[in-house]
């Protein structure tokens, strides 16, 4: 089912971009809980492991935020707005996505992913349901393909995962203190080594790349030392406010067509604000396996 596959692929990209497959909390420097008033900004850190620990502890205490993303690649653009609760097995989020004019509303709650269907989706899938469900324990091909990866990505969706990648796959090349939207922040410039980052994401998601795909990627990246320049802005409570990533060199190394850039900017606001994400009513949700059977797929 081409439409379902496309929706799932785009959503996977968004989930990984926003959450990047988080990991278990590790011992490290203790971080204060997010302050209710104005707090003093400490000096930037030079040790990525300590920085990852501080950010991880802070987001663990705050637990929730609103988030937005703007990404472009190969002349295509994607925007995402949403809110997330980062709480292990209880993690949940809602997102509204616009990919070159195609709009999608997505929910993740109770370990299941829900796509809201528009008229074109309903016609292609031959259903009158408002939502279709993808779950880690689903028996349809899409759920079996993506369910485990989705579950892992969202369960560990702490945005500080970017710093976990830095501690294992990159290095801090510069740090300073700058204003961001009127707030003084610690600003870090980071280089993430692509080959190490891919190995981390694939390994921790528990879904290995097909051998031929892995072989092709290895061949294209071999000896090129490709990095993903990344910038991070943290507030006084060591909570991420903004992350930018430039994957242009990475995409070109893989042979992506065109001369355009591949960049993403992710912004976090309203840390610690309670959020509500609930599953759609059961009678509005279609079972993906049944829909595919009826459509003869």
Image (cartoon, rainbow, N blue to C red):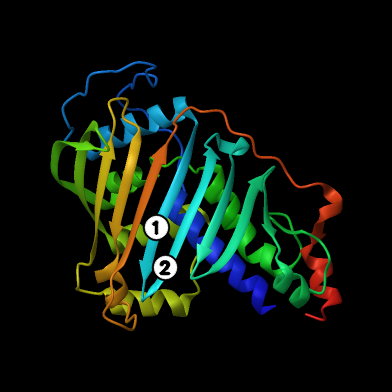
Relative height, residue 264 to residue 140 (above, below): above
Image location (x, y in percent) of residue 30: 33, 21
Which of disc 2 and disc 1 is earlier in sequence? 1
Cα separation, mark 1 vs mark 2, equals 7 Å
Q: Position of residue 182 (x, y in %)?
A: 24, 33
Can residue 246 be seen here? The reply is yes
Q: Residues within 10 Å of mark 1 (few under 14, many from 20)?
A: some
Q: Give the residue at x 63% y 48%.
A: 108
Q: Secondary structure at mark 2?
A: strand
Query: Could you say where residue 214 lies in the image, as x and y percent from the top left?
Result: 41, 74
Q: Which mark is residue 52?
A: none
Q: Is residue 219 left or right of residue 293?
A: left
Q: Nearer the viewer, residue 37 or 84?
A: 37
53 or 286, nearer to the observer: 286
Q: Residue at x 27, y 74 (%)?
A: 221
In the rendered image, which residue does mark 1 sit on? 70
Indicate left or right for 164 with 259 as reference.
right
Q: Residue at x 38, y 80 (%)?
A: 216
Q: Which residue is mark 2?
A: 77
Q: Residues within 10 Å of mark 2 (few under 14, many from 20)?
A: some
Asked if the residue under mark 2 is in contact with the one under mark 1, i.e. CB atoms within 8 Å, the reply is: yes
Q: Relative to residue 19, is residue 258 drawn left or right?
A: left
Quadrant of the frame with the N terminus: bottom right
Task: Check the image and report above or below for 263 versus 156.
Answer: below
Secondary element type, mark 1: strand
294 vs 55, left or right, is: right
Which quarter of the picture shows residue 260?
A: bottom left
Q: Quadrant of the C terminus?
A: bottom right
């Amino acid at each position: 089912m081409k439409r379902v596959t496309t929706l799932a692929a785009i959503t996977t990209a968004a989930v990984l971009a926003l959450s990047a497959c988080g990991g278990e909390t590790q011992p490290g420097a203790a971080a204060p809980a997010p302050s209710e008033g104005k707090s003093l900004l400490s000096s930037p850190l030079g040790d990525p492991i300590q920085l990852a620990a501080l950010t991880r502890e802070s987001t663990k205490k705050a637990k929730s935020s609103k988030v937005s993303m703007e990404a472009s690649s190969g002349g295509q653009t994607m925007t995402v707005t949403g809110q997330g609760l980062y709480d292990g097995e209880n993690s949940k989020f809602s997102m509204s996505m616009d990919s070159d004019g195609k709009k999608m509303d997505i929910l993740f709650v109770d370990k299941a992913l829900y796509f809201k269907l528009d008229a074109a989706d309903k016609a292609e899938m031959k259903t009158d349901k408002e939502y279709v469900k993808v779950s880690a324990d689903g028996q349809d091909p899409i759920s079996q393909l993506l369910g485990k990866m989705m579950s892992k990505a969202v369960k560990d969706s702490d945005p500080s995962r970017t710093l976990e990648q830095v501690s294992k796959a990159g290095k801090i090349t510069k740090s300073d203190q700058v204003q961001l939207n009127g707030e003084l922040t610690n600003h870090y410039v980071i280089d993430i080594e692509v080959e190490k980052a891919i190995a981390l994401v694939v390994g921790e998601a528990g879904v290995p790349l097909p051998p031929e795909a892995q072989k092709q990627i290895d061949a294209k990246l071999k000896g090129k030392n490709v990095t993903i320049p990344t910038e991070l802005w943290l507030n006084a409570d060591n909570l991420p406010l903004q992350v930018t990533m430039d994957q242009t060199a990475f995409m070109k190394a893989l042979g992506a067509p065109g001369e355009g850039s591949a960049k993403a900017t992710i912004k976090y606001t309203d840390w610690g604000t309670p959020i509500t994400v609930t599953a759609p009513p059961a009678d509005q949700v279609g079972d993906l396996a049944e829909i595919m059977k009826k459509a003869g797929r």
